[in-house]
């Protein structure tokens, strides 16, 4: 399970050091792709297979389903951490998430999210300010 918030840097070659506690889970391979809310997702291979299967099963006759599958799948890149636990984040994905040098890696159970540090802080503060409303809405869903 991925949980927590970790501050890291992307080096001049576009590599991100994965937090040490997550490296074993990603050592057999992972996928980095566009995420929602202008971040990137780093997903272990086995979790990616589940997600990709769901995306492939979306109805191709629906424009939104096709658009979302394209969004997630066309930007995806297979990755394997190197011996130092670094994953290459290609330029097109760094541009999408507006990643500079300082990033935040956030654990979200089955995936990691990679955020530009400034964007993460803005998002986090907004979410913290709305946490009561969010909890109330999720309560209606049984959470």
Image (cartoon, rainbow, N blue to C red):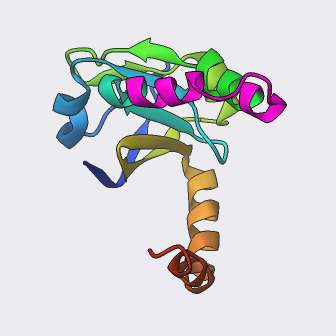
- Where is residue 75 shown, x and y percent of the image? 62, 19
Count of marks overlaid on the render = 0
Q: Residue sitting at 20 percent across and 15 percent down?
A: 83
Image coords of residue 37 (percent x, y): 66, 48
Quarter of the image with the C terminus is bottom left
Instruction: Please state which of residues 83 and 49 is positioned toward the viewer in this rendering.
Output: 49
Instruction: Locate residue 124 relative to residue 109 in the image: left or right.
Output: right
Residue 13, visible in the rendered structure = no
Q: Is residue 113 magenta?
A: no
Q: Quadrant of residue 8?
A: top left
| Residue furthest to the right | 63
Q: Which residue is painted at 57% across and 84% down in the image? A: 136
| Residue closer to the observer: 63 or 101 | 63
Image location (x, y in percent) of residue 133: 62, 83
| Residue 77 visible within the image | yes
Residue numbers of the magenta segment: 49-66
Residue shown at the point (47%, 43%) measured from the top left:
113
- Majority secondary structure in the magenta region: helix
Image height check: is 80 above or below 53?
Answer: above
Magenta-colored stretch includes residue 59:
yes
User: In percent of the image, x 59 and y 38: which residue is there?
Assistant: 35
- Res 17 quadrant in image: top left
Relative horizontal placement of residue 5, taking residue 90 as reference (left or right)? left
**Coordinates of residue 57 in the picture (x, y in percent):** 57, 25
Can you say whether 8 is above or below 29 in the image? below
């Amino acid at each position: 399970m991925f949980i927590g918030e970790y501050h890291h840097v992307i080096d001049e070659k576009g590599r991100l050091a994965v937090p040490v506690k997550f490296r074993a889970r990603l050592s057999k391979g992972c996928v980095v792709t566009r995420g929602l809310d202008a971040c990137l997702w780093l997903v272990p291979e086995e979790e990616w297979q589940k997600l990709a299967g769901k995306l492939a099963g979306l109805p191709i006759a629906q424009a939104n389903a096709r658009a979302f599958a394209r969004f997630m799948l066309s930007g995806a890149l297979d990755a394997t951490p190197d011996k130092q636990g670094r994953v290459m984040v290609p330029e097109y994905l760094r541009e999408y998430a507006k990643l500079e040098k300082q990033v935040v890696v956030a654990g979200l159970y089955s995936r990691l999210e990679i955020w530009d540090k400034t964007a993460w802080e803005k998002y986090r503060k907004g979410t913290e300010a709305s946490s009561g409303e969010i909890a109330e809405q999720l309560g209606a869903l049984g959470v």
